[in-house]
Amino acid sequence: MSQVAQLNRRRALLGTACAAPALSLLAGAARAQGVENWPVKPIRMLMPNAPGSAIDTLGRIIGQRLGEQLGQQVIIDNRAGAGGVIGMEIGRNANPDGYTVIVASPPSLTVAPFVQAKQPFDPLNDFAFISQIAVTPNLLVVNPTLPVKTLGEFLDVVRTKKVAMNMASAGAGSQSHLAGVMLTTLGKFESLHVPYKGGGPSVAAVVAGEAQWTITPAPAVMSLVKGGKLRALAHSLPRRTALLGDLPSVIEQVPGYDYSGWVALIAPRAVPRPIQERMRAALQKTMSTPEMREAMAAQATEIALSTPEELRALVKRSLADNVKMVKALNLTAD
């Protein structure tokens, strides 16, 4: 190699060596600027549930007001399927830049992955925990043409089999399925389980009289109860609540019954901590407004915010309870 060629090669190598740190600094500055200015564009709120489901209903109410708090639109992205696995996997694999968040609930986060032949994600280690948002009681509802107006009358009918009483659910492993199985087990009665493809169709089946009852998240049925298309007999919280007036708790006549749901906000695991904290602060401000308290009350939903550590502990408890039920029922994906 000539002396000139050698000199040019050394100059090129030197230039590359000098440019690498500069490019690294620029990239780091860009990332820092992205965190500092977040959010600068709309945020996608992944919904591992079908439109019209209880979680979808709550997510849309929360998303609109959260967007107002953040100064950016929050766009709902429904990705239902496989009990919530599809949406959860999309969320786990999303770019961790703070522009994708996931609305999680027990069925999608702590039931669905254990119904699959191969566990598709780790509920505790694949996500960043932002905050719990709410507690959603399940409502025991029946078709209003049935000759039952109280929980006691319902139990009498199903135990004596005076009337055919089929139980609708949103599908195997859904919250309505597990809540219903717990009710039949502790209530000591049998009822044919009729699974549907989602909460909306299962509730519609009870309205139409195809199935006679379901015990499903309150937001999915509150408007139908108020409109007289369904009759509510009891709720799943361990005590009565002002949100549901004089409606009794199932536990009052079925000792040990306590199976309500919760809603939480999570994100891809590697989302920068400052963005997580900013999202949590915005969520807390959103949920503390009188308008949001009124909106949640209309859905018989209790606001319940948390720290990331408290949410992680809640998920661990939910996992322990639901994995036992999945194994006991021998649930498997279709």
Image: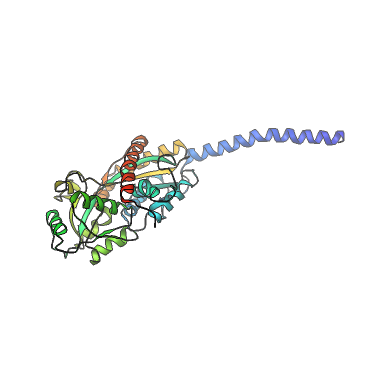
Q: How many marks?
A: 0
Q: Report if residue 140 is visible in the image.
A: yes
Q: Position of residue 134 (x, y in %)?
A: 29, 44
> Which quarter of the rendered picture does the N terminus lie within?
top right
Looking at the image, which residue sits at the far right?
2
- The answer to whether any part of residue 290 appears in the image is no
In the rendered structure, the answer to whether residue 238 lies left or right of residue 118 reads left
Residue that appears at 36% across and 38% down: 312
For the C terminus, give its image quadrant: bottom left
Q: Position of residue 136 (x, y in %)?
A: 27, 48
In the rendered structure, the answer to whether residue 154 lies left or right of residue 69 reads left
Q: Is residue 183 above or below residue 16?
A: below
Q: Residue at x 18, y 49 (%)?
A: 250
Residue in the picture at 29% in, 54% down: 177
* Closest to the observer, 292 or 163: 163
Q: Could you tell me residue 137's position as x and y percent?
A: 24, 48
Q: Nearer the viewer, residue 157 or 239?
A: 157
Q: Position of residue 172 (x, y in %)?
A: 33, 55
Q: Nearer the viewer, residue 275 or 110?
A: 110
With respect to residue 120, does 170 lie above or below?
A: below
How are the residues colored? Answer: rainbow
The answer to whether 294 is drawn above or below residue 125 in the figure is below
Q: Does residue 15 appear left or right of residue 21 in this picture?
A: right
Instruction: Kindly indicate the quadrant of the structure image that contains residue 281.
Output: top left
